[in-house]
Image (cartoon, rainbow, N blue to C red):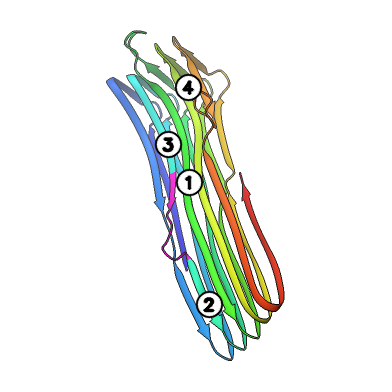
Amino acid sequence: MTGVQTCALPISVGENAVVTVAGTLDVDSTSTATLNGRVRAVSGGLLAGAGADVSNGVTSDVTAGFGANARIAARSILVNAGNVLEKPSVSGGNVKGGTGGLISGASASSVTTVSFDTKVDVGAGAVISGTGTEATAGEFVLAADNRIRAVDSVAFTTGGALSGARAQSIVKTTQDKATVAVGTGARLTSPGDIEMSARGSGSVNVATNVETYGVATVATGNSVAEIRPVNLVTIGSGALVAATGNVLVSTGTDTAFNRDAYALTARMDSFAGSVIPIDDIDSDATL
């Protein structure tokens, strides 16, 4: 069973555009992907074998911002680019099954891969101006944010005089990038504060369970929870960022230095009810 979601979501005020707003200019580009899979497999016989695989993937490129040489003026300027993955828990697990026979074998796998490229982009030569006075200044915020919430579980049981099982549960990022980029020669000014942030958060819980029964059994498996965030704020050569208040720049934290929240759990359980048990199991949580 395979599910793949691909998204490209660019929202931008075009090159050389002139936009004047008395109130708030809000440019928001956010993609939310919800995915999951569920497989059940049972096999029995003198010689029995079963395989169950679930593969999920999401690739999402999201951009919000202003084109080269755009001229923007507004009391409040809010630009947000965001990517969100939701993979909720499934009753009974994502993959569950079993085999039974004189000689039996089983294989179960659930793999989810995530690629996020999220960017707020101010083009070269763009002039972005917050209007008003220090007393009446609005917000000036450029923010890129990635959020990953995923639960995955695999359980398989096999029994026979000779039995073996392999199982894995994996949730990992191939790219998890959030960027705020101010182009060469761009000008950002505000009578209040200017805030630029590239951030993320994640909660991933994976679990694998393998049970084997027989005279001689072999069980192998692994659980992997892996998020590798890259958060960047870049200001090009010749660019100007000027605020009467504060210029607040943060990556991986808020402006009060509270770090982004990540919680990763990987669990691998194996039980062998046999005279000759052989296990090769591993679990890994990486941030």
Q: Nearer the viewer, mark 4 or mark 2?
A: 2
Identify the mark nearer the N-term, 3 or 2. Answer: 3
Please say whether residue 90 is one of the residues in the magenta stretch: yes
The image quadrant of residue 235 is top right
Q: Is residue 100 left or right of residue 9?
A: right
Residue underneath mark 4: 125
Which quadrant: the C terminus?
top right
Identify the mark nearer the N-term, 1 or 4. Answer: 4
Please say whether residue 280 is one of the residues in the magenta stretch: no
Identify the mark nearer the N-term, 3 or 4. Answer: 3
- At label 2, the amino acid type is Gly
Disc 1 to disc 4, C-alpha distance? 34 Å
- The numbered mark at residue 98 is 2
Marks 1 & 2, CB-CB < 8 Å contact: no
- The numbered mark at residue 81 is 3
Residue underneath mark 1: 148
Marks 1 & 3, CB-CB < 8 Å contact: no
- At label 1, the amino acid type is Ile
Crowding near pointer 4: few (<14 within 10 Å), some, many (20+)?
many
Q: Which residues are magenta?
A: 84-94
- At label 3, the amino acid type is Ala
Crowding near pointer 2: few (<14 within 10 Å), some, many (20+)?
many
In the image as oriented, which residue stretches furthest toward the bottom? Answer: 46
